[in-house]
Image (cartoon, grey):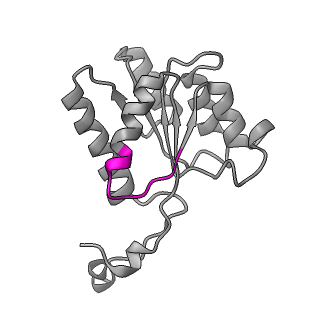
Amino acid sequence: MLSSASLIQPIPSLLVVEDSNEDFEALQRFLRRSPIAITIQHCMTGDQALAFLYRTGRYSDHESAPRPGLIVLDLNLPGTDGREVLRRIKQDDSLKTIPVVVFTTSNNPKDVEDCYQYGVNSYIVKPINFAQLKRDIQILIDYWFEVATLPGSQKPPSPQASDAQ
């Protein structure tokens, strides 16, 4: 049950780095059906994502490039691929605390291993089945936006946590 204090906490934005319009639109549809009002930012290439995160070029205004609380990253991107984007995020002291969820078609064990070596927080293989895709996205939303505490969204301690001290 949500307390009134937790309802006023800011919901961090979500950065989706996905070159497939079809995949992005499916993800966006599910996110918009969520009872949580999640601000979604979209980048289609790795270079665009890095410009967004480093606030360069057309993203130099902090209003147009808010620091995301979560990044959903495809690996197979044109230009700078998702593997390199992940590596650069997790090596940068100002970005490495942002959780990154890889959401990709690749089930290659080397990709999975490399991503965890780079510091990915979760690796999800995009399902082909629509019902499974819907379920996976709902679980992603539930976990990252309702269960986990994201950077920039400090939730007040639960009454149970303060009772235990």
The part of the image, by quadrant, that contains residue 138 is top left
Instruction: Name which residue lies at 38% across and 48% down.
Output: 32
The reply to whether the magenta stretch includes residue 33 is yes
The answer to whether residue 40 is left or right of residue 112 is: right
| Residue found at x 77% / y 50% | 61
Q: Specify the segment rendered in magenta.
A: 31-40
Task: Give the side of residue 127 with respect to residue 20, left or right.
Answer: left
Measured as percent of width and height from the top left, residue 59 is found at 74, 42
Q: Is residue 20 magenta?
A: no
- Residue 153 position, x and y percent, is 50, 64
Q: Quadrant of the N terminus?
A: bottom left
Q: 18 or 144, which is in the foreground? A: 18
Q: Position of residue 77 (x, y in %)?
A: 55, 19
Q: Is residue 162 left or right of residue 152?
A: left
- Compared to residue 73, the image places residue 121 above or below, namely below
Task: Give the answer, above or below, for where 36 lies relative to 71.
Answer: below
Q: Is 118 in front, or is 47?
A: 47
Residue 144 percent location from the top left of the image: 38, 51
Question: Which residue does the image show at 37% across and 18% down from the upper left?
Answer: 105
Quadrant in the rendering for residue 152: bottom right
Whether residue 122 appears in this view of the structure is no
**Residue 13 versus residue 140 in the image, above or below:** below
Residue name at image x 41 percent, y 39 percent? 28
Main SS of the magenta part reads loop
Whether residue 71 appears in this view of the structure is yes
